[in-house]
Image: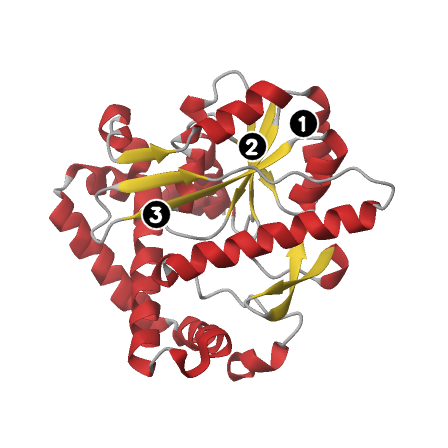
Amino acid sequence: MKLVAKLIEWGVNAFGFLLAKIPHRAFLVCVDGLALLMAWLDKRRFLDGLANLNFVYGESLSECEKKEIIKRCYRNFAFILLEGIRVVYIPKQTYQKKFEIVDEHYLQDSLKANGSAVLMGIHFGYWEAMATILPDRCAGYHLASLGRLTDYEAINRLIISRREACGVKLINKKGAFKHLLKMYNKGNALAGILVDQNISPGEGVWVEFFGKKASHTTIASILSRRFQIDIVPVLIDFNQDYSKFQIKLYPPIRSDFTKDSDMDIQETTQKQADLTEAMIRENPSSWFWFHKRWKSSYPEIYQHSS
């Protein structure tokens, strides 16, 4: 099995090297080809995405508009996968020129004032760039990102190698909180946390999201309250052909520290949900609509894929 894992890793790395050397137009052909293949093979994602869009927008969006958003989602997903394979083979200076950073001072001011911060991200646009671009802007800090590992060694090795190529430690979501506490107790910590997925109700709190009840992780809120640090939201979007990216940072969210810790956490988490909704409404086609975001509260809307 180790030999098979090695062969897969070598094959993916060779493919990534090739993708990094071909012209951008040829790379887009690969992106579009993979998107078409995924759309053909994985109908479940289409049905889940359509269920989410119907649930959120109802008839305010036409069926054609919803399908166009889902089509873009497949293309975005294909780009994320292929860019993740090739990014380590792109010269750093060439790669960094693709990015524009807006309002970076929100993050730098928070780090200067408090020593540590939490980066709040969502599955929007080129979210993986949190681990490839921002580390160079935060030298001297303990950097980490949360990620979900798989049951396959070869895939896990690739995930870890890509995430940690720029000095960002990958923390497995399973059992992540104890590692985060240890990290933030040391100070000078900055962890990126994606907050827009469904979780089991016992692991978070209920919030209102697009006017619907949804479960929401409290990890960022707890870290903010416990260490009295800022949660700095960040959004990384791309243009139509994935040649340019904009990293936009938002005013920090910070937990109160009152006698009612539950209320502090609830209010801070709702603020994250509100901002996430506003981000998505601004450009729906850049969000990853394939997640079963309302599974804990409205499982019936996903019954098509059970």
Label 2 belongs to which residue?
Answer: 144
Badge 2 density bin: few <14, some 14–19, many ≥20, Cα 10 Å? many
Q: Secondary structure at mark 3?
A: strand
Query: Can residue 231 be seen at all in this image of the molecule?
Result: yes
Q: CA distance from mark 3 to mark 1?
A: 29 Å
Percent x, y for residue 162?
42, 36
Query: Disc 2, disc 1: CB below 8 Å?
Result: yes
Label 3 belongs to which residue?
Answer: 237
Residue shown at 39% from the left, 71% from the top: 42
Q: Nearer the viewer, residue 42 or 76?
A: 76
Q: In which quadrant of the rendered view does residue 306 lie? A: bottom right
Q: Secondary structure at mark 2?
A: strand
Q: Nearer the viewer, residue 302 or 7?
A: 302
Q: Is residue 192 above or below residue 281?
A: above
Q: Nearer the viewer, residue 234 or 90?
A: 234
Amino acid carrying label 2: it is Ala
Badge 3 density bin: few <14, some 14–19, many ≥20, Cα 10 Å? many
The first of marks 3 and 1 along the sequence is 1
Residue shown at 53% from the left, 52% from the top: 275
Query: Disc 3, disc 2: CB below 8 Å?
Result: no
Tag of residue 152: none
Label 1 belongs to which residue?
Answer: 183
Amino acid carrying label 1: it is Met
